[in-house]
Amino acid sequence: MLTKPIHFLAEYLRINAIRRMLTIVDIKRGEVAGLIVFAAVFAVFEGIGISLLLPILQYAEGGQTAVLESSGFIWVLLSDFMDLFGLPVTLPVLLVLAFVPILMRQAVFYFNTWYSAVVSSRIAIRMRMQTLDTVLDADPEFFSRHSVGKLVNVLIAQTGAAGAAILQVIKLLSIGLLMALYVAILLAISVPLTLVTLAFALLVSGLIKTSIRRIRQFGVESAAISQEMMGKIVERMGLMRLIKLRDQKRAESERIRVFSEKMRLLGVKKARIGARIEVTADPLLMLSVFITLYIGIAVLGMTLAQLGLVLFVLSRLNAKIKEFNKGREEISKNMAGILLVQQTTEEAIRSNRITGGTVPFEGLAREIVLSDVTFDYPDSYTAEGKLLSAGKEVLKGVSATIPAGSFTALVGRSGAGKSTLVELLPRLRDATGGTITLDDTDIREFEVGSLRKGIGYLTQSAMLFNDTVRENLVYGLDFEPTEEQIRAALEQAYASFVYELPNGLETNLGDRGVRFSGGERQRIGLARVLLADTSVLILDEPTSALDSESEAFIQKALSDLHGTKTIIVIAHRLATVIKADQLLVIEDGHIVERGTHEELVESGATYQKLFETQLLA
């Protein structure tokens, strides 16, 4: 019997939404306790200030005699207080006594507002950092499903919306206490009048329930459009040269304009619904005031002082009811941001299947052994459950031994599985079958962080930040390198040209190193890897996009390192792999040949065919 009223009350107070929020947001008990104390103290001073208005109104109606003859509990308390301090019953004294709680209330209001902002901002930052940490832990497959722009939108815009929703919850707490206080004052004056007021408040809430639900729906749509728009903007900014070469400025501008127009229309719809709520609520709340006055005057025969206090409390209560409903709107509108953050976080957690062991990786001493290694790409789905890409078997029973200090080259056609194979070594991906051991220790037993830091990795396009040369070189190091160590790494990578720049190591590289040529970027990237001084070095097609001169520098660097580090290189160019101690020829996920360059050429099999078609030339 009470189920429906309880559910209605829970929806009206947004208890269900707040409960969902509390399961997502990290809120400290001390923060909540502080907010409750501030809200309670504010309500106490508000109640005292309003209660002291009754003696003032009675004084205005009948002078000192009317106050002294009053038998209400407010006068009893006031009389005891005035007797304690020997205060006369005069209008100035009554006004001062009523004004002091107002001043105290405003002081509490200031500190409450300040502390609420502190708490909500802390919670928003915690949510942002928790989301960021979770996303950073996610496997590469997660990032293949989500563009950088969409993730940035979740981390910045949607966590900001979550902070706004949290702030509204905090405000609702304070408003709810004040509303309870006003109702208590009205009950003390007249129970029938209070019941009339509550009936109208519930009527207003019921009428705007549908509108608030629609506002939440629009909030979800707005968050989705914002996420998609952010994704497109970030993606397009990263491909600005293509846009200019294809003269697509107008097309791209129109694309963003379409997104912006959708956002604008949703904003207009939300504004219209908000206005509809105001149009519905205001007349009903004013009607409740008029009906209350009628009952007070015609039915209950209340005094002018009592009616004046009732009217004042009703005006305050109606204002808070409107503010409360506005807060409900804001929570509904911003809940989409919280749910989107939760959705992204949960998906990132589900994707993180790589768990580390406890053994620190301290370098390779003997050999890397791959035994019957397989890898399958799983089916990839969107957040809505739609199939994004079907799974694929990439590696099929790969077995190989790579001695420490050797130079091993992986060759084969594009899509054969070479890059996937080397990604298994620093556990950017995990093999779905077989084992990989480093010095007889299963790779899964190593601490993930120490394993990855113990393997130098250079990709086809050097990964550089929009920062100085020095900051790019020392990024992620566990030690502070000396100038001599930095110079040695740059010289090993044939990147000493940076010292000839006007600002030397303090030269800014620009976005992704755009101010330097591809060869220069690659040599700086190699210098960073060498500065870490790892025992294992992986180079994934390091020269495929370089000119002959830059390629020669990289080849010289590899030749100098030969025998001092375990080098694994993926390459299509013969000059890069011809001096390798062993070549592993991969085709359709299998190692089909292995040996030196001379041995494989003489065999006349797959490697020879690749050589003849100049895929390695």
Image (tube, helix red, strand yellow):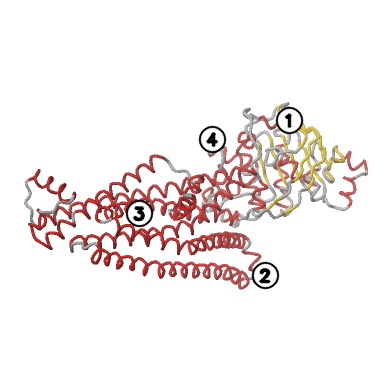
Q: Is residue 399 above or below residue 63?
A: above
Per the image, the residue denoted by label 4 is 479
Q: Identify which residue, 195 or 314, lies in the foreground.
A: 195
**Quarter location, residue 478:** top right
Which mark's residue is nearer the viewer, 3 or 4? 3
In the rendering, which numbered label is found on residue 237? none
Judged from the image, the secondary structure of the residue bearing numbered disc 3 is: helix
Which mark's residue is nearer the viewer, 4 or 1? 1
Task: Work out whether mark 3 precedes mark 2 in sequence or the reverse, and give the earlier one.
Answer: 3
Q: How many labels sit on residues? A: 4
Task: Work out whether mark 3 precedes mark 4 in sequence or the reverse, and give the earlier one.
Answer: 3
Which mark's residue is nearer the viewer, 4 or 2? 2
The Cα atoms of the two marked residues, 4 and 1, are separated by: 28 Å
Per the image, the residue denoted by label 2 is 246
Q: Is residue 329 above or below residue 354?
A: below
Instruction: Residue at 32%, 44% (x, y): give it.
Output: 37
Residue 395, x across and y down, in percent? 80, 42
Task: Work out whether mark 3 precedes mark 1 in sequence or the reverse, and give the earlier one.
Answer: 3
Task: Work out whether mark 4 precedes mark 1 in sequence or the reverse, and give the earlier one.
Answer: 1
Judged from the image, the secondary structure of the residue bearing numbered disc 2 is: loop
